[in-house]
Image (spheres, grey):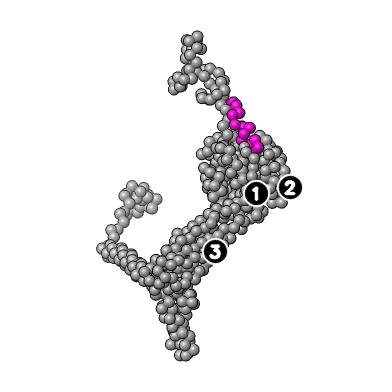
Amino acid sequence: MSSTSPVEAAPAARGQAAPEPPAPSQTGIAFRAARRSLAASARSLGTRVAHAVRAVGRLAAPVTGVISATGWLVLAGGIVALGIAGIFGWIEFAFLGFTLLAALVVAVAFVFGGMHYRVGIELQPARVVAGERALGRLLVENAASGPSTPSRLELPVGAGVAEFVIPTLAPGAEHEELFAVPTNRRAVIVAGPAVSVRGDQLGLLRRTVRWTDPVELFVHPLTARLRPSAAGLVRDLEGEITKTITNNDISFHALRAYEPGDALRNVHWRTSARTGQLMVRQYEESRRSQLILLQSTEREHYASDDEFELAVSVLASIGVQVIRDGTRLSVVTEGRALRTATPTALLDDTSRTEPARRAFPTVRAFVREATKRLPAPSVVITVAGSLLPIADVRSLETLFSADTQLLTFRVELGAPSRIQRIAATTVITVGDLAELPRLVRRVRP
């Protein structure tokens, strides 16, 4: 009887097909189906419970919405105190719990009663310069057919809230309140909405009714009055001949052979008749002033908040004068593009300018992104803080052509004002806003 060694049996084994896995048992199939069904039922039940909780929340909102944060703490404290009293038999906690719950019950009476008012908010003036006085007027009229009950009116103004006590008013009677609006710093101050409040003196329950929409007060930055045309920044560039060749302009350059698509009005017929070939005119492009005004609002580039405010004032001063001159202008910060249709629109938008944090990795990345969709500029003015490295200022030179004039207004609060040339960029250091007109007059393209 001969035996086959494992080495000899290996080829035969390799030539055979691999055995098929055993078919799943009926018990396993049923188990998996039951598990899937149970999971689907759990999900369905969870969805129904969530819908039910939301529905109960909507139904209870008129009641629960009246309870203030203090009221919820008092309610929780009363329940906990009664629980401790019931478990340990401490009468002191029972007294505390009933006292807290009684305060909530008594407070319920203060939230009932209707109010029918007509409320108006006026701010005079609607736009001021930082430091100027602004007043507000709140007018409340009883629009009900009967006398009103005394109530309290709350009016958010900026970061604070003004409270006014409205006395009993006869039908159609009015009550007026005047208030001052703080305008020490540049900002957009929102007054409103005015809401009437009914509730107890402890603030456990609080029912409010909104009567007005918010009203905005624009506090513009301080600006310096500059001379028209910014003393040559734009005026000296307008109409200057460049080396760019174009088909439509004023300064004649040369003639070239006609190409399909050329306008017939540019055909020089006398030369065409002499040469027997259509010839068209070419022109040297005249520079048209396009100014781009940029401000780096990165917080790390400014030594203080006052330095940032000085930078906003510099940007607003230059932008307002350029708009008055009628020059095409684009103003961009790291937050957004500012409106330049009118000086007032620009000042309104500068009131909203806030410091940014890591909006762009570098100033060069910000300027490249801000200008890539704008027309080719003749002047680019950048406003930045004293902590911006000079190397970052020079990096902007590679973004524009050699025909573009680059100016950087570097604000440094209290520093001596000066003008210096660094490579292709003119750097103007501004230490005080009052020095800006003199510095701009000294800048030449």
Q: Residues within 10 Å of mark 1 (few under 14, many from 20)?
A: many
Work out whether residue 181 or residue 45 is closer to the camera in this orientation and state it.
181
Circle 2 is placed at which residue position? 416
Three-letter residue code for mark 2: Pro
Q: Secondary structure at mark 2?
A: loop
- Picture coordinates of residue 131, whole percent (x, y): 62, 56
Q: Marks 1 and 2, how far apart in space? A: 15 Å
- Is residue 231 rendered magenta in the image? yes
Residue range (magenta): 230-246
Q: Which residue is mark 3?
A: 179
Q: Residue at x 62, y 51 (%)?
A: 222
Q: Report the residue that reaches farthest toward the right.
A: 416
- Asked if 220 appears above or below 393 in the picture, the reply is below
Q: Which residue is mark 1?
A: 385
Q: Residue at x 57, y 27 (%)?
A: 286
Quick check: can you spot residue 263? yes
Is 280 rendered above or below residue 108? above
SS of the residue under disc 3: strand
- Is 22 placed left or right of 333 in the picture? left
| Circle nearer the viewer, 3 or 1 | 3
**What x and y, as percent, mark residue 39?**
32, 65
